[in-house]
Image (cartoon, rainbow, N blue to C red):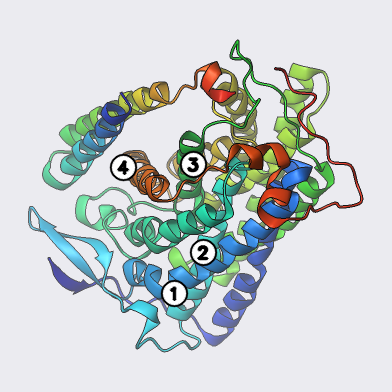
């Protein structure tokens, strides 16, 4: 789950960069940047979940 | 990939350059302040270790930045490597020599940039110290700082301050003035804050922090006086940092420095008071450490936009930062089981992100598309810097274990790693008050 989270973070960023570099229309660019950020937030959620410490481990 | 030349050279008159140099020489007060805050929020049995670690971080950061860091970061007026995509050139890494070879270190803006960055990268390196407090080995701290100062920080800083692709969003895509961050809310604070998050994840929580039912124990800082003194010193350093950064990176004139000082102060004041009020309402009394963190969060949030805000907007930026730091500190600890003794993640990462957004929402510089440029910058921090800094520190941990041995945590870092405590004439308490 940790690896999936980080891969989603990178994938979301790739969508953002591609949108900025490749899309000429402002509307499409905004939509894809927002989509990329959403993917990143999903990835961050997974990464956070993967790092939740079980009480026994924290001791 | 070909070298190209980025925007015209920033010109500073001799008087402006002198003024800027004086400001830069005050920046170490921010580092000193942060070191004191980190130490005060940590435990007494690791106080000497914390201060020595701050000194080592400052030293390693300065050395590594000069050896390799500036070679990747460069300056806006210097050549860099570019990728051409869809007919547009995007700068991605600088093409400077290692060891500053061939650069004339005189009164030029480039020299001032190098000096400011040597200090700023140390400030970024101090941020993770508080999240790894009481369990992060000194050798690992130095190695991790070398990775930060040698690669992560310079690469991202090039994209913003070295004329790289985030700075070019305005010219290439019509997104406002491109990504704007005058004093380093993103480059210094969020980069440091995300490194702090990575370190917290890699090290895990302190022994005894979470009970078997998952409830966090309170491990209070050992010296509120150090924390509050650190806040006051950091205030002066931050005014200097924001002012010098604005002069060198967003071409603000000396006439703008008083406004920057006013806005920086208002941000910190509003943030600290908001944090004090929120803790008073929630807990019945204002909390000293959270109010201090509120002060620092206000300074952090002010950095990006201080040169472009009017005073009322600066108070709003500070007020939001104060609410953010108190609410997220609890959320991180209770909901996400993150043990961040000094609150570096909520103060620096989240406060910095809010500062970057504030440029688009509240600053006078707000131009058409500016919000999208700022959002692309935040997406880059999240999608590039966090995986990079986590990956580098994870690899380091495979090679050289970052967390101290069990005995080290029980004895305290001072005795275990340094052989002597910071307060030899006082009794240092063990863990007898912790839940078991």
Q: Decide which of tag 2 and tag 1 comes sooner along the chain.
A: 1
- Residue tagged by mark 3? B199
Q: Give the residue displayed 59% in from the left and 14% down from the top.
A: B214
Q: CA distance from mark 2 to mark 4?
A: 21 Å
> Badge 2: how crowded within 10 Å, few (<14), some, or many (20+)?
many
Q: CA distance from mark 1 to mark 4?
A: 29 Å
- Residue tagged by mark 1? B66
Q: Are marks 2 and 4 on the same chain?
A: yes
Q: Give the residue displayed 81% in from the left and 42% down from the top.
A: B224
Q: Nearer the viewer, residue B5 or B424?
A: B424
* Label annotation for residue B245: 2
Q: Decide which of tag 3 and tag 1 comes sooner along the chain.
A: 1
Disc 3 is placed on an element classified as helix
Mark in the foreground, 3 or 2: 3
Q: What is the quadrant of the C terminus of chain B in the image?
A: top right
- Does the residue at mark 4 contact the one at mark 3 (Cβ under 8 Å)? no
Q: Decide which of tag 3 and tag 2 comes sooner along the chain.
A: 3
Mark in the foreground, 3 or 1: 3
> Badge 4: how crowded within 10 Å, few (<14), some, or many (20+)?
many
Would residue B8 appear left or right of B243 to someone viewing this image? left
């Amino acid at each position: 789950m940790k690896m999936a989270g980080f891969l989603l973070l990178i994938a979301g960023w790739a969508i953002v960069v591609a949108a900025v570099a490749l899309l000429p229309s402002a509307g499409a660019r905004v939509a894809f940047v927002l989509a990329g950020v959403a993917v990143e937030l999903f990835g961050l959620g997974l990464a956070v979940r993967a790092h939740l410490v079980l009480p026994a481990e924290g001791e | 990939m070909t070298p190209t030349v980025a925007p015209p050279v920033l010109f500073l008159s001799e008087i402006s350059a002198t003024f800027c140099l004086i400001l830069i020489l005050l920046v170490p007060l921010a580092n000193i302040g942060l070191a004191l805050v980190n130490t005060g929020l940590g435990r007494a049995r690791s106080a000497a270790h914390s201060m020595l670690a701050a000194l080592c971080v400052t030293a390693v950061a300065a050395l590594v930045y000069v050896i390799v860091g500036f070679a990747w970061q460069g300056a806006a007026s210097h050549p860099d490597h570019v990728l051409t995509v869809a007919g547009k050139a995007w700068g991605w890494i600088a093409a400077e020599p290692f060891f500053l070879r061939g650069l004339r270190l005189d009164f030029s803006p480039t020299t001032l940039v190098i000096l400011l960055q040597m200090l700023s990268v140390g400030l970024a390196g101090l941020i993770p110290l508080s999240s790894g407090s009481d369990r992060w080995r000194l050798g690992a701290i130095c190695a991790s700082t070398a990775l930060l100062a040698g690669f992560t920080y310079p690469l991202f800083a090039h994209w913003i301050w070295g004329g790289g692709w985030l700075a070019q969003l305005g010219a290439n895509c019509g997104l406002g003035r491109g990504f704007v961050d005058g004093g380093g809310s993103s480059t210094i604070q969020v980069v440091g804050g995300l490194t702090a998050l990575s370190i917290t994840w890699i090290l895990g929580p302190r022994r005894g922090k979470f009970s078997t039912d998952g409830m966090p124990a309170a491990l209070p800082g050992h010296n509120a006086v150090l924390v509050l003194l650190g806040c006051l010193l950091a205030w002066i350093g931050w005014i200097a940092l924001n002012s010098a950064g604005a002069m060198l990176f967003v071409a603000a004139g000396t006439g703008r420095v008083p406004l920057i000082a006013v806005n920086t102060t208002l941000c910190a004041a509003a943030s600290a008071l908001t944090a004090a009020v929120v803790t008073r309402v929630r807990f019945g009394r204002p909390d000293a450490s959270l109010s201090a963190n509120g002060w620092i969060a206000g300074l952090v949030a002010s950095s990006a936009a201080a040169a472009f805000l009017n005073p009322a907007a600066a108070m709003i930026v500070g007020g939001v930062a104060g609410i953010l730091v108190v609410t997220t500190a609890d959320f991180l600890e209770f909901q996400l089981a993150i043990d961040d003794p000094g609150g570096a993640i909520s103060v620096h990462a989240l406060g910095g992100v809010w500062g970057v957004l504030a440029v688009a929402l509240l600053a006078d510089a707000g131009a058409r598309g500016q919000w999208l440029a700022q959002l692309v910058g935040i997406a880059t921090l999240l999608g590039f810097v966090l995986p990079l800094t986590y990956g580098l520190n994870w690899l380091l941990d495979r090679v050289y274990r970052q967390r101290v041995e069990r005995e080290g945590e029980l004895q305290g870092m001072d005795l275990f790693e340094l052989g002597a405590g910071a307060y030899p004439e006082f009794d240092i308490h063990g863990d007898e008050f912790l839940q078991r």
